Amino acid sequence: MSERRVRVRFAPSPTGALHIGGVRTALYNYLFARKHGGDLIFRIEDTDSHRFVPGAEEYILESFQWLGIKFDEGVSFGGQHGPYRQSERRDIYKKYVDQLLAAGKAYIAFDTPEELEAKRAEIQNFQYDARTRSLMKNSLTLSAEEVEQRINDGQQYVVRFKVEPGREVKVDDMIRGEVIIKSDILDDKVLYKSADELPTYHLANIVDDHLMEVTHVIRGEEWLPSAPLHVLLYEAFGWADTMPRFAHLPLLLKPEGKGKLSKRDGDRLGFPVFPLEWHDPKTGEVSSGYRESGYFPEAVINFLALLGWNPGTEQELFTLDELVEAFDLSRCSKAGAKFDYQKGIWFNHEYMLKKSNEEISKLFAPIVAGNGIDEPMDRIRTVVALMKDRVNFVQELWPLCAFFFIAPTEYDEKTVNKRWKEYSAQQMTELAEVIEQLDDFSKEHQEEVIFHWVEEKGYKLGDVMNAFRLALVGIGKGPGMFDITEFLGKEETLNRLRRAIEVLK
């Protein structure tokens, strides 16, 4: 196994938006492939034609493009092992179905859904297996002639895998260690359906993984129950020597309460569970996405990487390259990981601080323009430098920063009651006269002159500065006062000061 080139795959079904748990699975596959100098394959599992949703495949691809997770081969990437869409591989699967039938490892079953339902009603906890297959209509209970006749008559059938009882099936899991399952509890899973001439997930996956030379299958914990069957299928085909190693990742759990993370949790608590906004073509429902909610892709990647895996150090902020370097499947948790969406917001704030003012300004400029303000980029950059540490998302800047670009038309009542004293109008009138005299309007010079004036007059600095802030901003918040006045300039500072004196008296 060690001599084989590492090859892993991410194989979503195009049945709707990509859940954030699927994104994490893809990310771990990506990190593992890059860490070991291997390949990441993108495969589409669309054998269940009834569940196909138009636009889902394109949505999944766009999500990974936004996140920066790159695939080496697969649907839309090309490669030597195509086609990579399962619906285009019918003939390949049929050959392997016939191989299992010929070897007596599988059999044909004609039971209708109604007959199966009747049997479930008759036998408690019924499952199609070594104990019950003799009671059913299949090629093990019918003569070869009758089987042939039924097929020739166009009767629909399925092909089931023949699980032999009395065996211990060992699954070598890189996260959970050796898992042993008794074959007696496994049912004879359907591998192929004549109705649409397509295999089920179980057969298609095994055949694809083998033919695409997949060395490691890294997937969600929910697939663990199917692993013993996959081991048996590898053996049935005589491929035991090239069987991939399994790693079943811990579930993403609800932020509060028990159970796995669902879209309802996101709707209720106000966070996305999809990478991009999703417009459901069937219901018309629109679901929020991380991109549209203002998250940086690097923050989402960093947040997801640490949900169920830890680097063994105190480090929390990682670039994608650093994640590749640090990634080790053995450091994945066996227990589910609570989806702490507040931590996701924290990561976005940290990436806001890491990004240059230039980069944030480019994202903020369209918001400024959208509010009818025409400002040059250097002035937008000045505001971003002053304010970006106060927000988690770029779109939160405008409500906090609007006063830089638009003079207040009203003044916060609570702040007025608290900060505008009976002598404030008189002090602000005097302050306007001091500002009027300034030739050098740099913040350093303003501060020196105004503080000197306050001291000379014997005023309380807090009284003066609080009333000054209220006059310019309209509320008792914002960065340093002289950062604000330097940005506004002398004329605008005086205009705002005089208007506040007039309105507040």
Image (cartoon, helix red, strand yellow):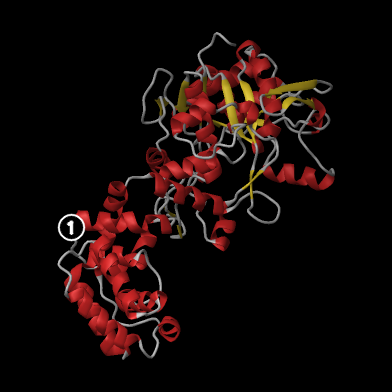
Is residue 192 visible to the viewer in this orientation of the structure?
A: no
Quick one: label 1, few (<14), some, or many (20+) residues within 10 Å? few
- Residue at 26% x, 89% y: name it: 502
Q: Position of residue 139 (x, y in %)?
A: 71, 25
Q: Most extreme residue toward the top, as rendered?
A: 3
Taking depth in this image into account, of 458 and 467 the one nearest to the observer is 458
Rendered image quadrant of residue 481: bottom left
Q: Is residue 433 above or below residue 111?
A: below
Q: Is residue 374 above or below residue 254?
A: below
Q: Is residue 95 above or below residue 404?
A: above
Relative horizontal placement of residue 341, taking residue 505 as reference (left or right): right
Relative horizontal placement of residue 308, taking residue 376 as reference (left or right): right
Taking depth in this image into account, of 371 and 379 the one nearest to the observer is 379
Rendered image quadrant of residue 307: top right
Query: Amino acid type of disc 1?
Result: Pro
- Residue at 34% x, 57% y: name it: 386
- Residue at 27% x, 60% y: name it: 444
Q: Position of residue 161 (x, y in %)?
A: 69, 25
Q: Position of residue 11 (x, y in %)?
A: 51, 33
Is residue 230 visible to the viewer in this orientation of the structure?
A: yes
Q: Name the quarter where the N terminus is drawn.
A: top right
Relative horizontal placement of residue 428, taking residue 323 as reference (left or right): left
Q: Position of residue 255 (x, y in %)?
A: 63, 53
Q: Most extreme residue toward the front, as rendered?
A: 456
Count of numbered badges drawn on the protein = 1
- Label 1's element? loop
Q: Most extreme residue toward the left, as rendered?
A: 439
Q: Name the quarter where the C terminus is drawn.
A: bottom left
Q: Is residue 8 above or below residue 154?
A: above
Taking depth in this image into account, of 392 and 416 the one nearest to the observer is 416
Taking depth in this image into account, of 61 and 376 the one nearest to the observer is 376
Residue under numbered circle 1: 376
